[in-house]
Image: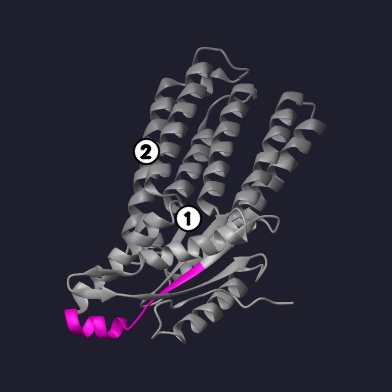
Amino acid sequence: MTSIVRVSVVVVTIALFMGSSFHAMTGQRDLAILFALATPLGISAWGFSRAGHNEAALALLCVVMVTLVTMVLILSPLGVHDVVIAAYGGIVAIGSLLLTRQRFYLLAAFTMIAGSLAFVLDLNGLTRSRIGELSTWPGYAEFLVIVTIFAVLGRYASERLFGSLEDLHRVSSGDPVTGLANRAGFLHGAAARLKAIGTQNCAVLVLVDLDAFRRVNLVIGHRAADGVLKDVGSRLSQAAASHLTARIGDDEFAVLAQVADEAAAEALAQSLHRVAQYEQSGVSVRASVGFARFPRDATSIESLLLAAEGSLTRAKDHEHEAGRFAGPADRI
């Protein structure tokens, strides 16, 4: 997905730049300005992709292309004809294969409205078209039918062959038991968040490991133990508010949060430690907690995770004590 989006962004951005240059050389000033204005939006889509927001990048790219095609139709002397139908159909087909349902429906509706506007303006002589006979009401009906077929068949093929992107994303980055992100989803999301936070601010990674969870499985059964995992995940999510929470192991959870300072980092870790100690259905749920601070202890998610794992190991070394809580060792 990432490679497809990035290649698409690069190709479209280069095409926009070349289109602006071509129209400038042929004396079509309005079209040259239009392509020039669209080019930075292609660069913005690259920024979204680099930050890990691939779908947002693709959606922006599709909207830019639909808007550009519509404006070209209004400003071009060639009018509305088969090339237009192919352009709109191609954009909708790409969206049907790569966008989630909601964004695809929005794109399809936007394409229909934009295309209809171009046709109606051209048919009423409100564009710069010099070839009016190519723009007809039957042509407009053909546009609606063909784009609809592209949308329906593309989406049907996408979901039948590959499943919806929502399902694919849920399987690849979600935990089916707790509904939280899994390890892969956490690493991807955490890397993007740390980049957004920047090294001038402070964040904390807290690891929560349930103690003797294998025994819990044996005592109450796997189904009930899954209920414990779900409950722990819910408690941590509520305590961590809008921060990134994930189940990254069989009985291990992770929370990444931006905080005001290092004191706030330890306070949040302590609060999560308290949340993970409770009684349920006659079972005492206990957890060990370790944490690491960003950027003091590490500046990437992989190294931050290693630092937090070291803290968690120290916490578990004291499993017979009430605390079972440890932070990173101070470094000189």
278 or 129: nearer the viewer: 278
Q: Does the magenta segment cover residue 145?
A: no
Q: Mark 1 sits on what residue?
A: 243
- Give the residue furthest to the right: 25
Q: Locate the C terminus and report the quarter of the image it occupies.
A: bottom right
Vertically, is 227 above or below 216? above
Q: Is mark 2 on a helix, strand or loop?
A: helix
- Horizontal side of residue 202 vs 230, given as left or right: right
Provide the residue span drawn in magenta. 206-220
- Residue, x 60% and y 71% (percent of image)? 304
Q: Is residue 161 visible?
A: no
Quarter-of-image position of residue 22: top right
Residue hosting label 2:
148
Measuring from the top left, give residue 29's x and y in whole percent.
77, 25
Of tags 1 and 2, which is closer to the observer? 1
Query: Crowding at label 2, few (<14), some or many (≥20) Cα neighbours within 10 Å?
Result: some
State how the image is colored. one colour
Q: Position of residue 266 (x, y in %)?
A: 54, 64
**Left/right of residue 54 with respect to residue 212 in the rendered view:** right
Label 1: which secondary element: loop
